[in-house]
Amino acid sequence: MRGYTTTALVLTTLASLALTGCSDDSSDSSGTSPAAASSSRGGSDAAGATPLSSAALSKRLLTEQDLGVGYVHKAERAQHDDEVSVVGCPALAKLGGDAATGGSLDFPRKAKAAFTYGANGTSEVSEELYSDTAPKLSDGVDRIFDAMACPKYQVVSGSAAIDVTTQTSTAPADLGEEQWSHLLTYSAAGRRSVVKQTAIRAGNIVVVVAGSPALVDAHLDKALAKARSHS
């Protein structure tokens, strides 16, 4: 396991924001109460054992129509040229350059989409779907979320440094067989941005929703329902 797309997008996005000024998303987190991470094993793997193809996963991603008025699909971010590194969190740094510069979870079957929301597109939400056997998905997501659990560290890109604090957050225990969630706060140049990142495993699929906390909470159920559909 060399990288994680959500982690990578968060790191590269904040590295870019550090050069242009962070947006303050503190209002989005007003209803969030961080608590112990939810990661419950067990339950049925009703979604089946055979992994889905990337093409099948892409059909199960949320669309602008699913999300509603005000959402605009966001083009995939180009790779950032500056080297991005993690300081003060050895476990995350050990994931290697891929985790900080756009690498993906090391599963070949995947699909992703990102959206902006609001009149100025200041809020964002992204969805990623992965498919493999349940044990492989379980072990992979466990490893990454454990690595991200450092309470404080820095992301460095060129001459810019972003301070990051991490808190475990609750994910709905009634969704899927396993749940993981973090609330991350990024600070740079006197500004801060809050990102919630939640992963749900349902059988042979992992759904990852990340972005403004209020948007993640609003669309997590819908993302999982569509990901589990058989259409």
Image: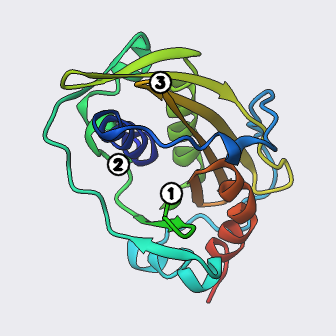
Q: Mark 3 points at which residue?
A: 190
Q: Are marks 2 and 3 in contact (CB under 8 Å)?
A: no
Q: Residues within 10 Å of mark 2 (few under 14, many from 20)?
A: some
Taking depth in this image into account, of 107 and 222 the one nearest to the observer is 222
Q: Where is residue 64 in the image (x, y as percent from the top left)?
A: 54, 81
Mark positioned earlier in the residue sequence (1 or 2): 2
Q: Are marks 1 and 3 in contact (CB under 8 Å)?
A: no
Residue at image x 36%, y 47%?
Answer: 106
Q: Mark 2 points at which residue?
A: 104
> What amino acid is labelled 3 in the image?
Gly
Q: Where is residue 109 in the image (x, y as percent from the top left)?
A: 40, 63
- Horizontal placement of 178 versus 117: left or right? right
Residue at image x 72%, y 73%?
Answer: 225
| Cα gap from disc 2 to disc 3, whole angstroms | 30 Å
Mark positioned earlier in the residue sequence (1 or 3): 1
Taking depth in this image into account, of 23 and 229 the one nearest to the observer is 23
Q: Is residue 53 visible?
A: no
Residue at image x 40%, y 12%?
Answer: 90
Q: Are marks 1 and 2 in contact (CB under 8 Å)?
A: no
Q: Position of residue 139 (x, y in %)?
A: 55, 37
> What amino acid is labelled 2 in the image?
Ser
> What amino acid is labelled 1 in the image?
Thr
Q: Which mark is residue 122?
A: 1
Q: Can residue 110 be seen in this view?
A: yes
Q: Position of residue 209 (x, y in %)?
A: 59, 55
| Cα gap from disc 1 to disc 3, whole angstroms | 18 Å
Q: Quadrant of residue 2?
A: top left
Q: In this view, does 45 lie above or below 178?
A: below
Q: In which quarter of the image is residue 154?
A: top left
